[in-house]
Image (cartoon, rainbow, N blue to C red):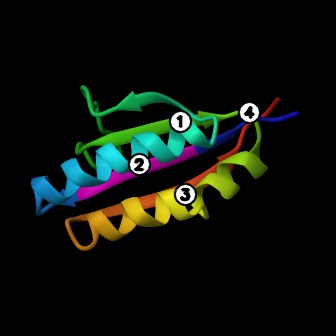
Amino acid sequence: MPKGYWVSVYRTISDPEKLAAYNELAALAVKAGGGRTVVRGGRVAAYDAGIAERTVLVEFDSFEQAVATRESAAYQEALDALSDGVERDFRIVEGLD
């Protein structure tokens, strides 16, 4: 069964305190949903007009599990804490295998 991945690329971080609150709550939601954070921040080499800001990659055992975790009450609480603290591109993608 193909794995599912959350991919987040942050364009701007306008409120680091909101991001910190989100990170605490999101980590709990991801763990409860069976996800594993593979990349969070770190160095970025951006090409082709890419964004060299924060990037996050979370792996789940399936695409469905990734979607269910995104829609969970625990993750919605994390999103409420984040509010307008960042501008980002968030997507869920299905792996190849």
Would you say residue 58 is visible in this rendering?
Answer: yes
For marks 4 and 2, give the CA distance: 18 Å
Q: Earlier in the sequence, mark 3 or mark 4?
A: 4
Residue beneath label 3, please? 91
Q: Label 4, on which residue?
A: 61
Residue 26: % across, % down? 41, 48
Measure the alpha-carbon separation of dots 3 and 1: 18 Å
Q: Looking at the picture, does residue 97 appear above or below residue 65?
A: above
In space, the residues marked 3 and 2 are separated at their CA atoms by 15 Å
**The N terminus, quarter of image:** top right
Of labels 1 and 4, the one closer to you? 1
Amino acid type indicated by mark 2: Ala
The reply to whether residue 49 is in sight is no
Earlier residue among tags 2 and 1: 2
Task: Farthest residue to the right: give it.
Answer: 1
- Magenta-span inclusion, residue 3: no
Which residue was labeled with disc 2? 26
- Between circles 3 and 4, the one closer to the viewer is 4
Check the picture and name the quadrant holding the C terminus: top right
Q: CA distance from mark 1 to mark 4?
A: 12 Å
Q: Where does the image place residue 52, in percent across and percent down from the top left?
A: 24, 42
In the rendered image, which quarter is residue 91 located in? bottom right
* Viewer-nearest residue: 81 or 5: 81
Dot 4 falls on a residue whose secondary structure is loop
Q: Are marks 4 and 2 in contact (CB under 8 Å)?
A: no
